[in-house]
Image (spheres, rainbow, N blue to C red):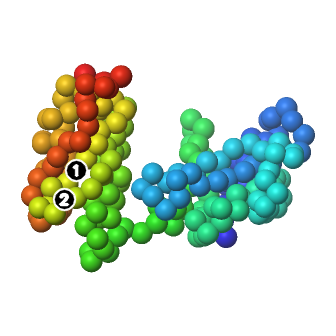
Amino acid sequence: MIEITPAAQEYFGKLLAQQDAEDLALRIQVQHPGTPKAACDLQFCPDGHQARDDRSESFEHFTLYVAADSVTWLEDALIDFEAEDTGGQLTIKAPNIKGDVPADNAPLADRVRWVIDSEINPQLASHGGMVSLEGITDDMQVVLRFGGGCHGCGMADVTLKEGIEKTLKGQFPEIAGLLDATDHATGENPYY
């Protein structure tokens, strides 16, 4: 299931030995599985804090608990540690956690949502913002709703026209335009 390289096993063993706790293990779970926002959450797990249905994997210096709902998403995952002069870099490669890009013949809403989640929202997140797909009208207008720092932001129209619209129309020429369904007057924490 999850491959942990010898270097990563050694790193975890040393890390756990430095903690002031007995019977300390590790636990991994996938957050937002099957979406572009999917990420691995790896934490210390004191004895008794694992879930009853967690899958347990024993290694020489530690035990790794895998959340039951994450097992299929972590198929073929690799955890590695690369030592460097300044410490090192732990990497978790889990090729299945984000799911699959919708096929070219998938509904337009699914393909647009994927691009919003995988390309547009990560950029908006730097300003504490995000956008979600409300729907697509019969005349091919994509209806979006801004949230977070984009809700009430004075630059939302520029973001919509110069950023989001160019990205979506560039990938989906059948889109006629974009509509903003957000009531920006109610925004409580706009970026601008």
Q: Give the left or right position of residue 20, taking residue 137 as reference.
A: right
Badge 2: few (under 14), some or many (20 or more) residues near its Cα, within 10 Å?
Answer: few
Residue type indicated by callout 1: Val
Question: Which numbered tag is attached to residue 137?
Answer: 2
Is residue 123 in view from this perspective?
Answer: no
Is residue 136 in view from this perspective?
Answer: yes
Q: Quadrant of the C terminus?
A: top left
Q: Name the residue: 53% across, 58% down.
A: 33
Q: Secondary structure at mark 1?
A: strand
Residue sitting nearer the eye, 44 or 188: 188
Q: Which residue is mark 1?
A: 143
Give whichever of discs 2 and 1 has the lower sequence position: 2
Residue sitting nearer the eye, 123 or 61: 123
Could you tell me residue 4's position as x and y percent? 67, 61
Q: Name the residue: 42% across, 56% down.
A: 36
Q: Give the left or right position of residue 7, taking residue 174 as reference.
A: right
Q: Give the left or right position of residue 90, taking residue 108 as reference.
A: right
